[in-house]
Image (cartoon, rainbow, N blue to C red):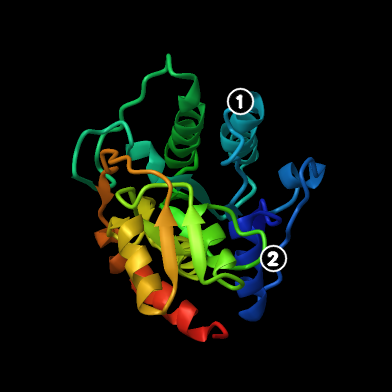
Amino acid sequence: MAVTVVGAEGFVGRRLVQRLKAAGKAPWTPRKGDADLLTRDLGVVYYCAGLTADYDKRPFDTVEAHASLVSEILRSGRFERIVYLSSTRLYDGLAKPAVDETEPLVFDPRDPRRVYDLSKALGENLVMTRADGRGRVARLANVYDWEDGAPGFLSEWLIRARSARDLTLDSSPAVARDYIHLDDVVSALIAIAAAEAPDIFNVASGELVTNGGIAEVFAASGRRVRFTGDARPTPPPNAAIARLKALGVTPRPVKDVVRAYLEGLRP
C-alpha cells in the first residue's frame, strides 16, 4: 500500500520518513502546493503539516495548515487511511487534573491565541466525521529530541548540554509538562495508522514532570541548572494513555531518556 507523509520536512515528519524508509517503505513526500496531492492515490496518509511556534503571528496560515488542506484531501477521497497530528494542548481549557480522549473540549473563541486550538479541533472533526471511518487522530504532547534545530524548551535544553555543564534557563522549576521523545511519537503514529477502528489517541508519556525534576537528573550527572523564574502556574490536565498502550506502545519516561542521553555525552 502507498504511504504519503504531508509535512515531511517538519520535525516529526522527517523522523517518520526515516523510520518508514528503514522499514522498507518508500513514502511519497509532497512539497507544499504540490497539485498531485489531490489527484493521485495516497494510500496511508500521515498528516504532519502544522504551525506551532509562530501560529499567533500567522493565524491564516495556521488555519490553512491545520484545517483547509486536510479538508481538501478528505474531499478528494483518494486515500486508504489518514492519521491527523493534533495536540494535547486542546485540553488546556479544562480545569481538571486528568483527562482522556472522550473529554469534551472547551475553547474561548474571543481569545486570539486560541486559533491554534480551534483550527486543530476543526481538523480533528473533519478527519473523524468526514473520512468514512478511515480517519485517526493523534494528540501529541510536548515532543523533544536533541538533533540540531529540534524545537521546544526541553530540546533546546538538551542540545545546550552537549557543550555546557552549567546552564541558566529562562523558566521556572515548578513548570510541569508531559514530554514524549520523538522516536516514541513515530512508533505511536505507525501503530495508530494500523489501528482497526477510527479513534482519537493521546500520544504522550502519561506523566507530568516539572522542570525541577528534570534538573535533578542533570544534577545527578554532575551538571548544574539554574532557573531565572519562580512562577508556579497551574499544570495542564494530565492526558491518559490507556488507548495508546492498548496498541502496544508505552512511551519511555522523560527522566529515563534524559538520564541515558546525559550519560552518553562526553565528560
Q: Quadrant of the N terminus?
A: bottom right
Could you tell me the amino acid type at mark 2? Answer: Pro
Front in this rendered view, residue 209 or 93: 209
Residue 14 falls left or right of residue 192:
right
Q: Secondary structure at mark 2?
A: loop
Q: Residue furthest left?
A: 97
* Mark identifier at residue 254: none
Residue 6 image offset from top left, x and y in percent:
66, 51
Where residue 111 sits, quadrant-wise, is top left
First along the sequence among labels 2 and 1? 2
User: Which residue is disc 1 drawn over?
Assistant: 59
Instruction: Look at 43% across and 73% down and name the residue there.
Output: 258
| Along the line of sight, the residue nearer the viewer: 265 or 74 | 265
Residue receiving disc 2 = 27
- Picture quarter with the C terminus: bottom right
Q: Residue 155: percent from the left, percent from the top?
A: 53, 60
Label 1's element?
A: helix
- Provide residue 233's location: percent of width, then percent of height: 29, 38
Q: Is residue 191 left or right of residue 244?
A: right
Please provide percent x and percent y for residue 29.
73, 58
